[in-house]
Amino acid sequence: MDELDFYVTAISAQRVLGLGMGSSLEEVTHSFGKDFVEDVHGPLLRRDYGLLEFTFHRYDRWKCCLIGVQVHRILWGDNEVIPDAVSAKYGSFSPHLAAATLSRALEARGVDLDGAARQTFSDSIKMSLVELGVEIIVLKGQDDERLQGDVWSIHLSEPKRPQLT
């Protein structure tokens, strides 16, 4: 398995190494260890493991409600930002992830980014697959052409269910 498998599996399964929405703090700690930065804002707690951020909401217990894959951090942190559990399974990661490459790999798994809702900003495009609970931020590359079309981040959350009328 390689880094592209990591990204495609995270998006298509909405899970990272078996962890997803509803996972507990203990489960994340068991998989990724105690080397993290943590902050709490009201009912939300965020654990930052470098490439990965897990956000939890306090219900009867802390439950994961968002997973952020901060692809851009590899540019500045090299592979040091990749948690050991991820690199053990997927190897080293390139500092660039082209959205076109990701799109082709997702299409091979039955996930079509062409149908994603798009929201355009001055420096990026947000593609949302609400039925999967996935948002992908792609850079326009205005400040640095080398980054044009690169994935900045991927966010996994609870899929939106269609409203019954």
Image: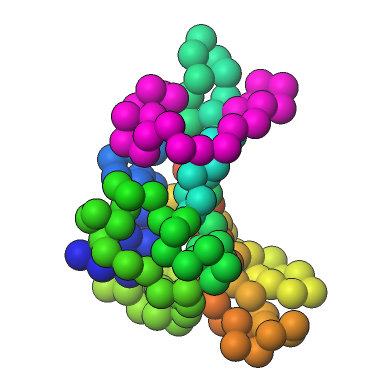
Residue 31 magenta: yes
- Percent x, y of residue 70: 54, 57
Give me the residue at 32% from left, 29% from top: 30
**Residue ranking furthest to the bottom:** 145
Quadrant of the snapshot with the C terminus: top right
- Percent x, y of residue 122: 79, 74
Disc tally is 0
- Colour theme: rainbow
Q: Nearer the viewer, residue 96 or 134?
A: 96
- Percent x, y of residue 140: 67, 80
Q: Is residue 66 above or below residue 97?
A: above
Give me the residue at 37% from left, 34% from top: 33
**Residue ranking furthest to the top:** 60
Asked if residue 64 shows in the view, the reply is: yes
Q: Is residue 45 above or below residue 119?
A: above
Asked if residue 118 shows in the view, the reply is: no
Q: Is residue 129 left or right of residue 10?
A: right
Residue 80 magenta: no
Q: Quadrant of residue 8?
A: bottom left
Q: Is residue 111 left or right of residue 120?
A: left
Q: Quadrant of residue 19?
A: top left
Q: Is residue 154 left or right of residue 91?
A: right
Give me the residue at 66% from left, 71% from top: 125
Q: Which residues are magenta?
A: 24-45
